[in-house]
Image (spheres, grey):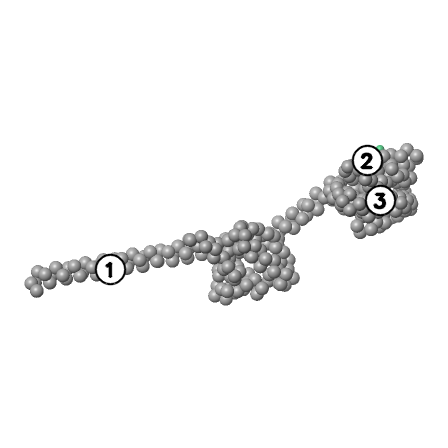
Amino acid sequence: MPIDNIVLLLIVLLGFIALLILVNLNVHRKAQTQKQQLNSYEQILNQVGAYIYVKDINCRYVYGNQLTLDYFGINQEQLNGSTDNQYFPEVVADILLENDRKVLALQQKMSDDIMVDNNGHHNVYHEVKQPLFDKKGKLIGLIGVSTDITEEFHLRSKLEQLANSDPLTNLYNRRSFNAFSEHEFSRAMRYFGSLSLMIIDIDLFKNVNDTYGHLVGDEVIKRVAAVCDEHIREADILARIGGEEFAILLPDTDIDSAFKLAERLRLAQQIGTHSTMLNDEALPGITISIGVASIQLKDRSFADMFARADKALYSSKHVGRNSVNVA
Ligand SMILES: Nc1nc2c(ncn2[C@@H]2O[C@H](COP(=O)(O)OP(=O)(O)OP(=O)(O)O)[C@@H](O)[C@H]2O)c(=O)[nH]1
């Protein structure tokens, strides 16, 4: 072979080798960049203040960010292939599994608040789960994000309680009484059940305030509430619906039984008790007037029943107070 050809062949060969090295270098660099990117994604996921995890289509863990791993007290390898049964009490694990299955079956995002009692700790978590697909659109599992909402949950419950109760007596307020009443009214109408209502008003309460002052007046209101509370059943709903006005909703109670209870309450309120709030000073005696009504087939809403009880209360006041009337 002429020398020129050999040189040419060598040059081509060297060029080819250089090209190979270049391609290889590029592939390596690309892989490195991808790895670096993945690492930084993982770092980001580890810094998010939420539990982030991925499960396969059999609801087994395949990934958990650092917070998840710390919560379970394991490492990534130990997490792989495990299920919630290993980390949560059975009741909680069952709920989590049910939610996983829903997400996979419906291929839809869902969220839920989960209460977890673990080793004496009561926590509430808000979890959002959504199906995970590969590039071809095939379902491969799910991704979940859980956040600890224990504080918000307690705050929300407290606010709800405040919105629904009367601060002086701790009884239900008018708003929640109405909600309960509408519900019980519909139930009684649907099942032809009995339902009664009494409205209670303290007699000449203005005199109590004017004579003894508002503080004593408040104590009297609290005592009336306590006496009522002592006489009712668990299913009955007692509320303070106005300044010196109370209401009791009596499910499954006919008008005769309601009247008898009202009479017992009227007599009980006459017996003076002592308030610990006022260093055992005797509170002034009071009397109450009561209007009683029961559900009737012609009633269109709870308001009709309430109007009858109110009318009966008016009659009780009209006949000289300290009495019970039915309408
Ligand atoms: N201490 C106190 N008084 C209240 C409260 N809410 C309303 N009242 C008072 O309750 C009194 C109600 O008076 P009235 O509506 O005239 O009725 P009454 O004096 O009870 O007379 P009758 O209902 O006709 O027997 C008013 O003086 C109100 O200021 C409260 O939360 N605390």
Q: In whole angstroms, how far apart are the C-alphas of marks 1 and 2?
A: 94 Å
Up/down of 223 relative to 98, above or below:
above
Whether tag 1 and tag 2 are in contact, CB under 8 A, the answer is no
Residue, disc 2: 307
Which label's residue is closer to the chain start, 3 or 1? 1
Quadrant, the C terminus: top right
| Mark 2: amino acid | Ala
Q: At which x and y percent is residue 59? A: 53, 60
Q: Under 8 Å from ligand 1: the CB of mark 3?
A: no
Amino acid type at mark 1 = Leu
Label 1 sits on residue: 20
For mark 1, give the secondary structure.
helix
**What is the C-alpha distance between the residues marked 2 and 3?**
23 Å
Q: Position of residue 20 (x, y in %)?
A: 24, 59
Asked if residue 141 lies left or right of residue 282, the reply is: left
Name the residue located 56 percent from the left edge and 62 percent from the top edge.
Answer: 84
Residue that lies at the very extreme toward the top in this rendered image: 318
Residue wearing tag 3: 224
Q: Nearer the viewer, residue 200 or 143?
A: 143
Pair 3/1: label in front: 1
Q: Is mark 1 within 8 Å of ligand 1?
A: no
Q: Is residue 277 among the parts visible in the rendering?
A: no
